[in-house]
Image: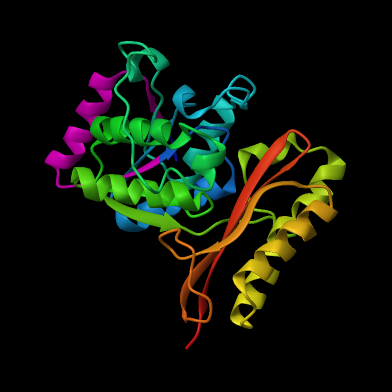
Amino acid sequence: MHTDVVEDLATLRERIHGWKRSDLRVGFVPTMGNLHAGHASLVELAHAHCDRVVASSFVNPTQFGAGEDFARYPRTPQADIELLGASGCDLLWRPSVDSMYPHGIDAAVQLHVPALTDVLEGAHRPGHFDGVASVVARLFNQVQPDVAVFGRKDYQQLAVIRRLVRDLSFPVDIVSGETIREADGLAMSSRNQYLSAQERSRAADIHRVLLRMRDAAIGGQPHSRIEADANEALAAVGFEVDYAVLRTPELQTPPTGLAGPRVALVAARLGRTRLIDNLEFLIPD
């Protein structure tokens, strides 16, 4: 399938308004490019809910902090177009920084989602989720989708976007896609390519630690012990751990001993590469 590439807002809106005049339901998959099979699965999921699918490719400077990898973030535009075409994407929206921030980055309107953005990723990457919320709001206004699809690997990002949509009354249904993993359990990510061969062989230990955290929680171990053991296990194989925690779906510290849905979340560095992953599970009655 051929994917059309659009780089100006007037053309984007003309195409989308034409679809909507024909009563076609529009799905949207926002990305930063450098696409892989995980992104392809999100496009396919969007097609299950919609008649037409738009993806975006925009490396958003406002969600990168000082010393982070904005400049070296991989850009693979031609490979992205080919993957999107093979996945059934109808249109790729590829805005410029100037069109996204017409008054400049420093003068851009920013959005802040309180509470959810001050913990975990937000605590370790100050301002990151302000950049995410602001660019997603812009993209929603530009594309005006009926449905938007996000992966669950970025669990906190998904929670922030759900809150944003509810609080600002965006007429967009949010659908979440499963984390797609390599054969050894490593969550697919554009940042995996930064890993050296030796680091790549250890990276899947994150998933193994998440599985152990799940099993220990279901087995009734205290959360403090589970988190301490997870931090120790990751540090022992060379990770610099930002956090390895158990939370409720709302990212609150769960009460020990009570049943209900849980999520284990890890963020850790191997060398210069920061990896995140999570695992959702249920503690039965």
Residue 264 vs residue 73, the one in the foreground: 264
Image x and y of residue 215, in percent = 65, 77
Direction from residue 157 to residue 281 in the image, left or right: right
Which residue is at the front of the view, 121 or 187? 121
Q: Does residue 5 show up magenta in the picture?
A: yes
Q: Which residues are magenta?
A: 4-29
- Which image quarter holds the N terminus? top left
223 part of magenta stretch: no
Residue 211: % across, % down? 67, 69
74 vs 237, left or right, is left
Compared to residue 123, the image places residue 244 above or below, namely below
Residue under the point 79% across and 60% down: 233
Q: Residue furthest left?
A: 21
Q: Is residue 172 visible?
A: no
| Residue 20 vertical placement versus 5 (above, below) | below
Frontmost residue, 29 versus 48: 29
Determine the residue positioned at 62% across, 44% down: 189
